[in-house]
Amino acid sequence: MANTEPDWQQIVNDIGPCLYRYFCGAFSPTQASDLVQESLIRLVKKYRNGEFEPAKGTVKSYAFGIARFVRMEAKKDVPAFDLVDDESALDVQAEHQPDITDQVSHLRWAIARLKPIEQEIILLMIDADSSLDQIAVTLNMPVGTVKSHVHRAKENLRQIMEVKNEP
Amino acid sequence: MSHKDDELNDLLKPLQGLSPNDLQMQKWQTAVQKEVRTGQTTTITTTRRKLAFQLVAAMFVGVVMGAILIKSFSPTNVQNPLVAQISIDNATFEHSHANLD
């Protein structure tokens, strides 16, 4: 049975920016924007088909679950070097702040060098409001496992970034 | 409960500081509203199609059932002795024609 219709405008305002940051961790801002749109449209479709179950988590967790699949699909179509070195399509905000552009590109480059599960965890952790419980629901794994992945991912990310920073 | 990992938040700060511009937000809103409207239209169309299909199916079943009933209860030509007379298996056209009169 289909759920009652939510306030989609509010959902886009709340979840859109979080998904945008999630995708920016792996794609250029232009690509990220398109992928956010794709995820939101899939969210509407799935919600209307009654596939969202409130008992299993929030709309936000569900949206991130969809975003994961969208990211995996998009990754198949985009060569690895495009994911990390495409600086041509940065958004207006980033263009006016070259420091941020460099930092974001650097971070994206480093994230792309993590193991797939670590990449996933780190991308989900970009949203500072996300809880370990939410991430566990999205990834369908125990909270303890998420914690250990977070610890390892953090260490590896720091090491990769330090190596890149060395002259 | 947010994850509150300060060290990780420091590492991810550049990405956490990103936000979509108004144009992007507007684009997403429009796409979602369009999808919502399309979904509603599809539901209405599907319901109408279902109804039309049910009506056609019911009419077809009615016609078939009616034909069977009419055929079952109507007197057949075989019961008519005259027809029996002119329809014997080995009758020639002339024989049948003569018996018609």
Image: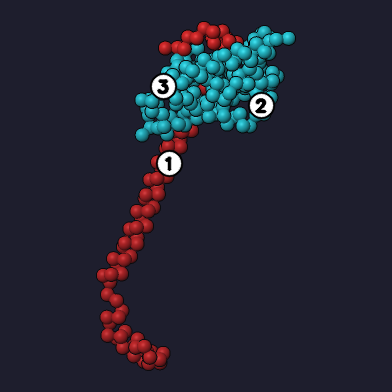
Chain colours: A cyan, B red
Instruction: Name the spot of residue A133 as percent of width and height, x first.
Output: 42, 18
Alpha-carbon span between mark 1 and mark 2 = 43 Å
Disc nearest the viewer among 1 and 3: 3
Q: Chain of mark 1?
A: B
Q: Nearer the viewer, mark 1 or mark 2?
A: 2
Question: Mark 3 = which residue?
Answer: A58
Disc sitting over residue A86 in the figure: none
Q: Is residue B69 above or below residue A63?
A: below
Which element is circle 3 on? loop
- Counting from the top left corner in percent of width and height, residue A32 is at 59, 22
- Classify the position of the C terminus of chain B by image quarter: bottom left
Q: Nearer the viewer, mark 3 or mark 2?
A: 2
* Circle 3 residues within 10 Å: few <14, some 14–19, many ≥20: some
Question: Could you classify mark 1 by the number of other residues whose Cα lies within 10 Å: few (under 14), some (14-19), or many (20 or more)?
Answer: few
Q: Residue at coordinates 56% horizontally, 21% vertically from top-left? A: A119
Q: Which element type, helix, strand or loop, lies under badge 1?
A: helix
Location of mark 1 (residue): B46
Q: Residue at x 31, y 84 (%)?
A: B83
User: Tag 1: residue type?
Assistant: Thr
Task: In this rendered view, identify the residue nearer to me: A59 or A76.
Answer: A76
The chain to which mark 3 is attached is A
Point out residue B28 in the picture as x, y percentages from the top left corner.
54, 22
Looking at the picture, how far across and down is residue A144, in whole percent? 44, 19
Marks 1 and 2 belong to one chain: no
Residue A80: mark: 2
Residue A104 showing in the rendered view: no
